[in-house]
Amino acid sequence: MRMRKLGGTGIQVSEIGLGCEHLQWKDEGLIRDVIHAALDGGVNILDVFMSEREVRSNIGKALKGRRNQVILQGHLGSCWLDGQHRRSNDPALTVENFEDFMTRLGTDYVDLALLHHVDTDENLDAMVNGGPLEYGLKLKKAGAIRFIGMSSHNPAVALRAVEEGVVDMLMFSINPAFDLLGDHSKSGQLVPGSEGTGDIHAERKKLYETCEARGVGITVMKAFGSGMLLGEKTSPLGKAMTVNQLIRYALNRPAVASVLVGMQTVREVEEALAYESAADEACDYADVLSGALTGTAEGRCMYCNHCLPCPAMLDIAQINKYLDLALLGSGATDTLKDHYLSLAHHAGECLGCGSCETLCPFGVSIVERMQTARDLFGK
């Protein structure tokens, strides 16, 4: 496993890391197997943003006796309240949930503590002014946190945090669709750059270059677009890319130190780690990104559940996943319908309030999609 320095922190991280998001709701044995396979393969950085208690406990059990092998990335403001995940700037909730995080993961320190899901200037102001940042800096001074970071999907807000010196490092969503086809970038004929990467949106390009210049290392989320870029039918690029190509693309951005892959089976760990021995030609993405690309990454669900909390207690990400499987596959098969109906709450219970849409980082028309799921699955 090749290692990279995470900017000015000086921490050496594996260029492939483990994003633990998709381990939520998996059983203890599977979580242990996935984490051990990753660590045995040379992975040394894990991101755990989830606030749900059981998955935290199971990750802690998997790390027992191996904490010293791991650069642990946790989140300030990722909270569990009334049976749902929510982002919160409330100081008391932040303290309660971060203390819970450290207890369940069996650690008395966190290497990288991130201000969680900061996508607007208002979010950033709330985090900085008497919010989670104050608590994080207190823990950093006490040695319980090594470095402060931030997770974001918005290049303008992330750039502001970097330029104002708020963060030591950044977790950011990077893939070709977001860089080339986001709602801010222009569609049409791409002009290949020196690496064949195309016409990257100016705000994103400035963010990456500023991070590089200021020594703010980046860990990458959503490198595969939650899998949408791996299939021709689902990719907004209109072309499928491979795991190797997408990892190489993200690692080629300035300041990037590690790509945190959401692996939920040992097989997926093996597929991601195969990048380390892959031939250069298997990782080259220039031909895929050349030519006219006219799609958009806006409005595509990433199944991240940042849209929560839902007043109707819907698992919006899972409903959207079943909906996409039906629309892009063979329809609402009996097996798929059974999985959908096994959910505690269904799309027909949607109140249409739109609170989820105000929280979604990707502009998904969630209320409309809930109506489609209700009509498709009959409930």
Image (cartoon, rainbow, N blue to C red):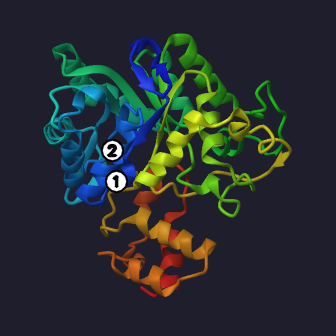
Q: Nearer the viewer, residue 268 or 364?
A: 268
In primary-sequence order, the first of circles 2 and 1 is 1
Q: Secondary structure at mark 1?
A: helix
Q: Is residue 36 left or right of residue 317?
A: left
Above or below, comparing residue 106 to residue 137 in the picture: below
Above or below, comparing residue 376 to residue 323 in the picture: below
Which residue, given by chain and number where applicable, does mark 2 sit on? 35
Distance Cα–Cα, label 2 vs label 1: 10 Å
Count the labels in the image.
2
Q: Nearer the viewer, residue 374 or 29?
A: 29
Categorize mark 1 by other alpha carbons within 10 Å: few (<14), some (14-19), many (20+).
Answer: many
**Residues tagged 2 and 1 counted as in contact (Cβ below 8 A):** yes
Q: Nearer the viewer, residue 185 or 66?
A: 66
Q: State the image coordinates of residue 92 (x, y, percent, origin top left).
A: 15, 37
Q: Quadrant of residue 251?
A: top right
Q: Quadrant of the C terminus?
A: bottom left
Q: Name the amino acid, label 1.
A: Leu
* Labels 2, 1: front one: 2
Q: Secondary structure at mark 2?
A: helix
Q: State the image coordinates of residue 261 (x, y, percent, origin top left).
A: 47, 43
Q: Is residue 299 visible?
A: no
Q: Quadrant of residue 155?
A: top right
Which residue, given by chain and number where applicable, does mark 1 sit on? 23
Task: Give the residue displayed 30% in from the left and 67% down from the top.
Answer: 313
